[in-house]
Image (tube, rainbow, N blue to C red):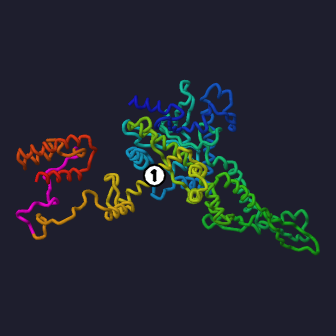
């Protein structure tokens, strides 16, 4: 078991996994995405978090970066938690997770393509039966988009593979890179939480991270980070708007109280008693029996009481208009900036007042689909890591570790239709140029489909194979004939034409004999007891071998003809025939090959001589 973990550590100790897949072709799997953003040790960054990446302490002790950034990371996560309480941002995170984990027409969240059927079954079992990806991928994606990072502990058993995964809180995990002087690419994870403290190797932790900004290395950047400042401003503006609506929006009243001849020293006491009588209601508590002046809901601070004196004066009440302050415009301005930071079309969230037709929504949908594709590529990268670990634990090595492909469903039907329409236009252009013979097919392959010359030739060869396969299927359907087995075709126009020619053409071989058959067994009057057999009725009781095509069967005494003579004629007759045919046999040795029909005709002539 220890050796197995050592091998796994060695496998994931480099920046990328490289495997030869045939000849000079290699496949690279960058599970840590070093190729895109690198590491904080070899990437120049602009320090925006309190000079964490450029301090003297960082250069002298690499651990200071991780622990200093850890505290800053927690502050960021706290802001993300507050943002998730907002219904607009919470819906945005749900939309990201929904669009990234859409099922295809076959009801699959993740499509697995492998050259080996056994590997495909193993990976299907891993993702759908062990990891239950149909249910779990949605919360994985949402947490990754929310925090920028998502961690899972991978439970691995030798010869079995991954048996379970356990989610870990982003608050409790640190990612350390470059801590080993022997291997600059070595990565390990430090967990410190309720379960204790421990260190894990790279292959024991699955780290989903949104890499888009080197300032956040070795961690990811949250989808919400771009709107974090806007969100705080929006909250302040909304609070100010509500405060204004509650405190300043109501109308005010101006009370002008005629005090008559009341001495100036008693005016204040008179006004206060008048205000108390208007703003407070006497109340006797039935339980305690105490007398209480309950405060009236009408706010005393919003009204004005002015004493007036004069012959024309009197007690009057005037209404003052409330403060006219249009705070909603400021709220909308900040809200639009938040939409831009979230990259979600407003129509998806119900704010579709500015959508002027389906074309506008389709354009927004395509742009949003590209954002979702970026999220899906990150998900696939880490899921590929899980698949490689599972295959390695089950004994697969070398090119078999990377002989598969994972795909998530495209989130936009409109986006797919745009690609189909583009390809359709290319095919129509190719067909038109081919039919008019204006350009060569090689030129069209290169400039329309961007094929190389070798790819174009291979495509032509594939078309020929397709035509052969189509012909084979048609023969099986119409004639029940498999050309690959019989090496023949039936029912084609060429076959029909050859059949018609064979029926009308003169038959090959010896022409028919002319004259009467009187005195033979073939006569119409019946068998003649003393007549001889017709030449057409004489049939040899031997079969001429193909090895005697070059001459008469008499050339060899062991032929079927010699056997015939031995069984039907006397020795003296055989000797006479042999002596008479000896010169002919010598001449036939230098002659060219003749057909089987000529051999048979020669036999019949010789039989007549004997008779």
Is residue 397 positioned above or below 554 on the image? above
Task: Magenta stretch: give its range.
Answer: 526-547
Residue 284 vs residue 230, the one in the foreground: 230
Percent x, y of residue 175: 55, 35
Percent x, y of residue 236: 71, 53
- Name the chief secondary structure element in magenta: loop
Mark 1 lies on residue: 464
In the shown orientation, is residue 385 left or right of residue 528?
A: right
| Quarter that holds the N terminus | top left
Percent x, y of residue 88: 62, 57
Query: Does the magenta-highlighted stretch encompass residue 360?
Result: no
Does residue 574 show up?
yes
Element under label 1? helix
Residue 260 vs residue 358, the one in the foreground: 358
Numbered circles on residues, count: 1
Q: Residues within 10 Å of mark 1 (few under 14, many from 20)?
A: few
Quarter residue 361 falls in:
bottom right
Taking the spot 17% from the left edge, 53% from the top edge, the residue there is: 605
Does residue 373 show up?
no
Residue 467 vs residue 406, the one in the foreground: 467
């Amino acid at each position: 078991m220890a050796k197995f973990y050592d091998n796994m550590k060695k496998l994931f100790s480099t920046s990328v996994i490289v495997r030869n897949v045939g000849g000079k072709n290699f496949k690279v799997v960058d599970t840590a995405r070093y190729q895109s953003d690198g590491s904080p040790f070899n990437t120049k960054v602009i320090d925006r978090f309190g000079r964490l990446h450029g301090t003297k302490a960082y250069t002298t002790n690499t651990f200071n970066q991780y622990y200093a950034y850890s505290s800053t990371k927690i502050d960021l996560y706290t802001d993300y938690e507050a943002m998730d309480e907002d219904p607009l941002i919470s819906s945005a995170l749900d939309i990201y997770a929904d669009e990234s984990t859409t099922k295809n027409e076959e009801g699959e969240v993740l499509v697995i393509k492998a050259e080996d059927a056994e590997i495909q079954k193993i990976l299907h079992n891993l993702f759908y039966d062990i990891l239950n990806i149909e249910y779990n991928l949605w919360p994985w994606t949402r947490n990754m988009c929310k925090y920028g990072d998502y961690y899972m502990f991978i439970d691995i058993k030798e010869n079995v593979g991954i048996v379970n995964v356990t989610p870990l809180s982003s608050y409790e995990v640190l990612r350390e890179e470059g801590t080993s002087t022997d291997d600059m690419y070595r990565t390990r994870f430090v967990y410190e939480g309720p379960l204790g403290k421990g260190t894990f190797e790279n292959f024991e932790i699955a780290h989903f991270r949104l890499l888009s900004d080197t300032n956040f290395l070795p961690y990811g950047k949250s989808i919400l980070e771009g709107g974090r400042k806007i969100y705080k401003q929006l909250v302040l503006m909304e609070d100010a708007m509500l405060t204004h609506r509650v405190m300043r929006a109501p109308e005010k009243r101006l009370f002008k109280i005629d005090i008559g001849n009341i001495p100036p020293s008693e005016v204040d006491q008179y006004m206060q008693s008048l205000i108390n009588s208007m703003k407070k209601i006497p109340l006797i508590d039935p339980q305690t029996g105490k007398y209480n002046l309950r405060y009236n809901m009408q706010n005393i601070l919003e009204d004005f009481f002015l004493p007036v004196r004069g012959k024309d004066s009197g007690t009057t009440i005037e209404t003052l208009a409330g403060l006219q302050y249009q705070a909603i415009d400021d709220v909308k301005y900040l809200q639009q900036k938040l939409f831009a930071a979230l990259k979600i079309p407003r129509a998806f969230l119900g704010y579709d007042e500015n959508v002027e037709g389906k074309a506008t929504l389709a354009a927004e949908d395509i742009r949003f689909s590209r954002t979702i594709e970026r999220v899906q590529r990150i998900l696939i990268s880490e899921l590929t890591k899980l698949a490689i670990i599972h295959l390695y634990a089950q004994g697969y090595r070398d090119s078999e570790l990377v002989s598969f492909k994972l795909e998530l469903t495209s989130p936009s039907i409109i986006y797919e239709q745009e690609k189909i329409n583009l390809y359709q236009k290319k095919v129509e252009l190719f067909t038109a140029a081919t039919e008019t013979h204006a350009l060569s097919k090689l030129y069209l392959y290169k400039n329309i489909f961007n094929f190389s010359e070798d790819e174009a030739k291979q495509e032509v060869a594939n078309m020929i194979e397709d035509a052969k396969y189509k012909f084979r299927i048609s023969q099986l359907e119409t004639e029940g004939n498999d050309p690959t087995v019989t090496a023949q075709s039936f029912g084609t126009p060429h076959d029909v034409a050859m059949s018609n020619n064979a029926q009308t053409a003169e038959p090959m071989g010896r022409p028919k004999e002319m004259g009467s058959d009187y005195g033979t067994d073939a006569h119409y009057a019946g068998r003649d007891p003393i007549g001889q057999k017709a030449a057409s009725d004489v049939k040899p009781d031997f079969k001429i071998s193909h090895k005697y095509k070059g001459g008469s069967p008499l050339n060899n005494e062991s032929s079927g003809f010699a056997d015939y003579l031995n069984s039907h004629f006397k020795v003296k007759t055989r000797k006479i025939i042999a002596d008479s045919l000896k010169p002919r046999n010598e001449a036939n040795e230098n002659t060219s090959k003749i057909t089987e029909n000529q051999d048979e005709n020669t036999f019949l002539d010789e039989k007549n001589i004997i008779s």
